[in-house]
Image (cartoon, helix red, strand yellow):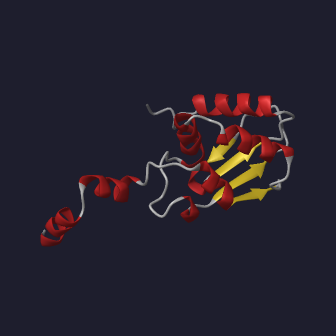
């Protein structure tokens, strides 16, 4: 009990929130730096389209994408550099992007254009809320 009281005296409420929930500040360029690719390289057109679309999204849409891909719309305490993020290829461009949130993995088909990639990403993140338990 004394340790809990000491913790409350040492930290402001927003600091406790950050420790529990993660950092709300989002810099997607940092995520790009730690991304690894499976079936793609950083120079592939689909990957270049992806980052061009993501880096130009409004903050709220970036948060939705992060939630879709990782299960959280917040950054770990140590920043994006503390994360692992993988973009994997699936060879069916008719599919929407998929994610494996336990592994911070985005499964991305090879789309032929930036416009198509943006459309598919937006459809995926706008229609993928949890496990239907809401």
Q: In this view, does 125 lie to the left or right of 16?
A: right
| Residue lying at the far bottom of the rendered structure | 3
3 shown above or below 35? below
Q: Say if residue 127 shows up in the picture.
A: no
| Residue in view at x 72 percent, y 52 percent | 87
* Image label count: 0
Q: Quadrant of the N terminus?
A: bottom left
* Residue 98 visible in the displayed image: yes
Which of the 4 quarters of the picture holds residue 19? Answer: bottom left
* Quadrant assignment, res 3: bottom left
Q: In which quarter of the image is residue 58?
A: top right
Q: Is residue 48 above or below residue 80?
A: above
Q: Residue at x 78, y 40 (%)?
A: 49
Question: As drawn, is 115 to the left or to the right of 77?
Answer: right
Image location (x, y in percent) of residue 16: 29, 57
- Taking depth in this image into account, of 38 and 41 the one nearest to the observer is 41
The residue lying at 78 percent from left, 47 percent from top is 47
Q: Where is residue 61 in the image (x, y as percent from the top left)?
A: 57, 35
Q: In which quarter of the image is the C terminus?
A: top left
The percent position of residue 11, horizontal first and vertical second, equals: 24, 62
Give the vertical position of 74 relative to 126 (above or below).
below
Left or right position of 79 against 39 = left
């Amino acid at each position: 009990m004394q340790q809990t009281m000491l913790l409350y005296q040492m930290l402001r409420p927003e600091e406790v929130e950050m420790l529990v929930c993660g950092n709300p500040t989002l810099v997607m360029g940092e995520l790009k730096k730690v991304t690894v690719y499976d079936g793609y390289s950083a120079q592939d057109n689909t990957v270049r389209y992806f980052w061009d679309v993501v880096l130009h999204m409004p903050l709220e849409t970036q948060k939705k994408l992060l939630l879709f891909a990782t299960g959280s719309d917040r950054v770990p305490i140590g920043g994006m550099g503390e994360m692992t993020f993988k973009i994997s290829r699936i060879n069916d461009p008719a599919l929407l992007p998929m994610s494996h949130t336990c592994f911070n993995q985005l499964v991305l088909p090879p789309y032929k254009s930036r416009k198509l990639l943006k459309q598919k990403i937006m459809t995926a993140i706008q229609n993928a809320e949890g496990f239907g338990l809401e």
